[in-house]
Image (tube, rainbow, N blue to C red):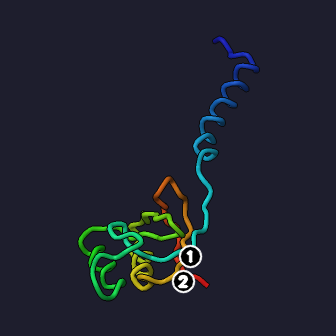
Amino acid sequence: MHRMPQYIRVWLMSLALLAFLAPFSFAGKAESFTGLVSDAMCGKKHMMEGDPAACLRACVQKGSKYALVVGDKVYTLDTDDKSTLATLDKLANKKAMVKGQANGDEIQVSSVSPAK
């Protein structure tokens, strides 16, 4: 039986390790964002008259996602975690700190807490 030379085995093992680790090197770092909890449909200015938190909740019930207004920028918050969604509901129209990975105008949320 023919044996593979040592340098080829080392090269193949290195290649396999590189292929395994490559996705981790491209993963973005989690960041912290502090801003006002809103919804993606209304953004910075709520359309319903009256209580902005009630408008936000109505928009979310109709399918809009939560958003975070940071200065002039509105980030859509992406999460399916029920605990995180409940926290966002409690923080409707209040300042919050969101931790997660931003990708353009969207944040993949890892945690939410009231801003201090």
Amino acid of disc 2: Pro
Residue under the point 53% across and 74% down: 35
Residue 9 position within the rendered picture, expressed as x and y whole percent measured from the top left = 70, 23
Residue 47 position within the rendered picture, expressed as x and y whole percent measured from the top left = 29, 75
Which of the pair 85/11 is nearer the observer? 85
Which of the pair 115/24 is nearer the observer? 115
Residue under the point 35% across and 83% down: 52
Secondary structure found at label 1: strand
Q: Which picture quadrant has residue 50?
A: bottom left
- Seen in the picture, residue 36 relative to 65 is either above or below; the reply is below
Q: Quadrant of the C terminus?
A: bottom right
Give the labeled residue for mark 1: 97
Badge 1 local density, few (<14 within 10 Å), some, or many (20+)? some
Q: Gap between marks 1 and 2, in whole Å?
A: 6 Å
- Residue found at the far top of this picture: 2
Residue under the point 42% across and 72% down: 44
Give the labeled residue for mark 2: 114
Residue 78 position within the rendered picture, expressed as x and y whole percent measured from the top left = 42, 63
Amino acid of disc 1: Met
